[in-house]
Image (cartoon, rainbow, N blue to C red):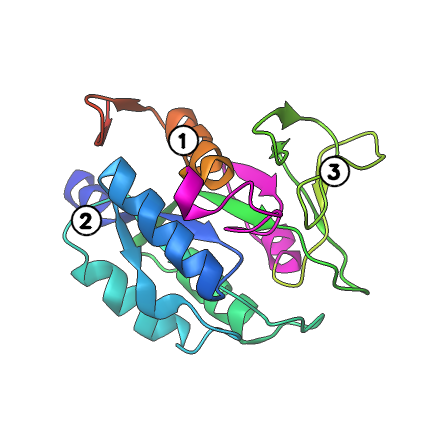
Amino acid sequence: MENQKRLKRNIIMITDGDAAARGTVEEVARRIGGRCISRSSGNPTPLTGERIVALIKKAQHDPVLVMFDDNGDTQMGKGEEALYYVATHPDIHVLGAIAVASKTKGALGVKVDVCIDRYGRKVNRPVNKNGFVEAGSEAYIIGDTVDVLNMLHIPVIVGIGDIGKMKGRDETCVGCPVTMAAVQFILRKNGYSLKNSRNWKNS
């Protein structure tokens, strides 16, 4: 059993996959010493869940950041189908998910553990696509690829605005601080600690 547990790959799921998200997620993975499945990016997600799992297994080391995107589909689209497959695969251990807000109408949304606004502040209220805090009594995210998270047992879910954007607040040229903060929050909740300036290790 112990050997089987060690074989599982540790991943963070991100519900956005456009070009801006890809550049940001790649940069965050580089900064934390992790890996990014760049081929998982696209509108909608271009790969099946089975193919994404195969790519995760080929990644040199953990944590592995993976993108999923429904491209505005309020039903269970390609992104959510792939996400569900990956999250429930026996060889995958999900550290957490980053639920990304969008302007999608008709989506149910998902309750999250915390939201991080465009200024990097942790809040217990919803944030919108631009990372602004909205009215509400609990942390909640509305997005086109987040409803499926309600069907899964995800240990940590962090809500943020549009990855790599938020009107310049999360661009790679400024260090993508919002996405970085979300990833770091998930890693800390899973017992990872910063051993040096770039690499996170599971303690």
As helix, strand or loop, the secondary structure at mark 3 comes to loop
Q: Please give left or right for residue 108 compared with residue 96 in the image.
A: right
Q: Verify CB contact (< 8 Å) between mark 3 and mark 2.
A: no
| Residue highlighted by disc 1 | 184
Q: Quadrant of residue 112?
A: top right
Which of the two residues, 59 or 8, is positioned nearer the viewer here?
59
Give the magenta range: 146-174
| Residue highlighted by disc 3 | 126
| Residue highlighted by disc 2 | 7
Q: Which-is-in-front pick, marks 2 and 1?
A: 1
Q: Position of residue 164 (x, y in %)?
A: 50, 51
Q: Verify CB contact (< 8 Å) between mark 2 and mark 1.
A: no
**Residue at 19%, 49% in the rendered image:** 7
Point out the tag, 2 or 1, that comes first from the N-terminus: 2
Q: Verify CB contact (< 8 Å) between mark 3 and mark 1.
A: no
Q: Please give left or right for residue 84 compared with residue 92 in the image.
A: right
Do we see residue 174 in this rendering?
A: yes
Q: Position of residue 68 (x, y in %)?
A: 48, 63
Q: In the image, is residue 173 part of the stretch drawn in magenta? A: yes
**Residue at 42%, 37% in the rendered image:** 180
